[in-house]
Image (spheres, rainbow, N blue to C red):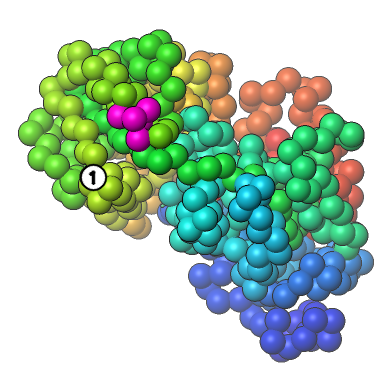
């Protein structure tokens, strides 16, 4: 046991401190080769133990990389400056659950899917549904303000957080908000910690809002011969004023690559796909789904509207597996999460293909159309360093395109280290100064996740 491990073991026990395993130095960010290193993997059992560890690390200027489920796609949980990785997995208690008041207080290390299940078993819904819910933790979702298909109607994770318990770099514990649905007493520190990617504080627990589960959720799928026709269908859904819960798209290349396993016959393989979901009471959802089907059917090659629960679940299971299926094509991929104003989505889908072609890369995209959020993707073979370098250059063009369209370099995954330094391209200097001042105020010694969420 190294000296740092021994010091921390003396504070919180030997069973909570060990050398990190290789997998604990990486997240799900693919093929980017960060030089990760850490001297210890630390798994506190309580907020008090997190506080002891942070106070010690702050005193000794030791870097701390908070880690949730490690499902991040921006390298956020990858330690770049040695020190410790602080794993939250042992803090997964449910501190309070009051289904009648539609709220729950959970520790940060609880898996997202567990919160989904608890809510569902009690007739409630926790709507944020990022795709790796069995792996990710609530703390990680809050730290990245994770989205997902249903963020279109229900908002990203932050919209469901009413209170936070967090440990500052100094080791002080703060509680903001709580089981209250409104609070404007102070500056919105809660919102500041949401999406802070482990750079401002370690989140140890959260009060979450829940909502009564809709009785029915009915997806409608439209297939279109061209990206233009698919984009027009998306616009028609928005312009119709129909309040769908999710509005997703998959471009023709993605549909072709992922068509195997789609839970219905795909007669026109390679078409652009639109998925819209109607939810509510059964009669409401059925009426809305029929109207959505009507709007989607103009110009559609086919419309598919599963109604049985098993078929609906199969469709979403397929949708959540798309990322992995696309990756399997060549063995690796570089995938970004740019966001543009909804009306520029069609152009951004086309631009992704053009950028890929310019860099001699197979490109595709899919994503959360209603939010203007694209997972623009370049396929690479593992070990093909030349293709990887071209993909890096292609991503820079993607970022420039998103900014030029009035969008952002990241809508879901965060800056992490993958997109570090790009904020300065989309924010004015005064805003960048505030961004940096916030970090200094929270973490003057720069021990919390150093090298991440950097504006420049
Ligand atoms: C197949 C797949 C599908 C995905 N789909 C989506 C999607 O639809 N939408 C979406 O938004 N994301 C998606 N993601 C990305 C990822 O799941 C989310 O970013 C998720 O919120 C990360 O949570 P995590 O617990 O795994 O965090 P980690 O990856 O462990 O960490 C992410 C960041 O949060 C910080 N952090 C973690 N826990 C804490 C804490 N308790 N306190 C302070 N900081 C902390 C880390 O330091 C890091 O910067 C997907 C990933 C995969 C692999």
Q: Read off the magenta span.
A: 282-286
Disc 1 is placed on an element classified as: loop
Residue 285 lies in the magenta stretch: yes
Q: Position of residue 417 (x, y in %)?
A: 61, 47
Q: Is residue 404 visible?
A: yes
Magenta-colored segment: predominant secondary structure: helix
Residue tagged by mark 1?
308
Q: Please give left or right for residue 138 compared with residue 214 in the image.
A: right
Front one among 330 and 294:
294
Residue 104: within the magenta?
Answer: no
In the rendered structure, the answer to whether residue 440 lies left or right of residue 320 reads right
Residue 210: image location, x then y, percent:
59, 45
Vertical side of 134 occupied by 327: above or below? above
Q: In terms of depth relative to the viewer, which is nearer, 400 or 196?
A: 196
Q: Is residue 384 rendered to the left or right of residue 1?
A: left
For label 1, being within 8 Å of ligand 1 is answered no
């Amino acid at each position: 046991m190294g000296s740092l491990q021994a010091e921390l073991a003396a504070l919180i026990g030997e069973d909570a401190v060990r050398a990190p395993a290789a997998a604990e130095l990486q997240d799900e960010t693919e093929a980017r080769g960060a030089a990760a290193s850490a001297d210890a993997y630390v798994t506190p059992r309580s907020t008090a133990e997190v506080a002891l560890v942070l106070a010690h690390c702050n005193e000794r200027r030791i870097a701390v990389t908070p880690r949730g489920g490690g499902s991040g796609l921006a390298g956020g949980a990858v330690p770049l400056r040695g020190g410790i990785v602080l794993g939250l997995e042992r803090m997964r208690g449910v501190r309070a659950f009051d289904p009648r008041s539609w709220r729950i207080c959970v520790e940060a290390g609880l898996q997202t899917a567990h919160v989904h299940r608890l809510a569902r078993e009690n007739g409630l819904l926790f709507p944020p549904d990022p795709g790796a819910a069995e792996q990710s933790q609530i703390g990680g979702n809050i730290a990245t303000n994770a989205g997902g298909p249903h963020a279109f109607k229900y908002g990203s994770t932050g919209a469901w957080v009413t209170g936070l318990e967090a440990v500052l770099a100094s080791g002080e514990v703060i509680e903001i908000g709580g089981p209250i649905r409104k609070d404007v007493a102070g500056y919105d520190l809660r919102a500041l910690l949401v999406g802070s990617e482990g750079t401002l504080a370690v989140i140890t627990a959260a009060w979450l809002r829940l909502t009564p589960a809709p009785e029915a959720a009915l997806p409608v799928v439209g297939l279109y011969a061209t990206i233009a026709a698919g984009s027009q269908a998306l616009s028609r859904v928005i312009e119709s004023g129909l309040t769908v819960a999710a509005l997703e798209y998959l471009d023709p290349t993605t549909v072709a690559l992922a068509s195997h396993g789609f839970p219905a016959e795909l007669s026109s393989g390679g078409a652009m796909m639109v998925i819209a979901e109607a939810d509510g009471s059964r009669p409401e959802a059925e009426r809305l789904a029929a109207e959505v089907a009507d709007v989607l059917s103009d110009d559609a090659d086919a419309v598919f509207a599963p109604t049985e629960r098993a078929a609906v679940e199969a469709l979403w299971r397929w949708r959540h597996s798309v990322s992995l299926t696309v990756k399997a094509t060549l063995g690796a991929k570089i995938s970004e999460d740019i966001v543009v104003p909804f009306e520029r989505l069609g152009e951004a889908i086309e631009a992704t293909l053009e950028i890929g072609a310019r860099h001699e890369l197979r490109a595709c995209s899919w994503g959360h159309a209603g939010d203007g959020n694209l997972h623009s993707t370049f396929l690479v073979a593992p070990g093909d360093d030349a293709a990887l370098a071209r993909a890096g250059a292609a991503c820079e063009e993607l970022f420039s395109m998103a900014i030029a369209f009035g969008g952002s370099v990241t809508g879901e995954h965060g800056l992490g280290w993958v997109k570090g330094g790009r904020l300065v391209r989309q924010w004015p200097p005064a805003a960048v100064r505030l961004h940096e001042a916030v970090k200094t105020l929270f973490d003057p010694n720069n021990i919390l996740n150093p090298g991440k969420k950097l504006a420049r």
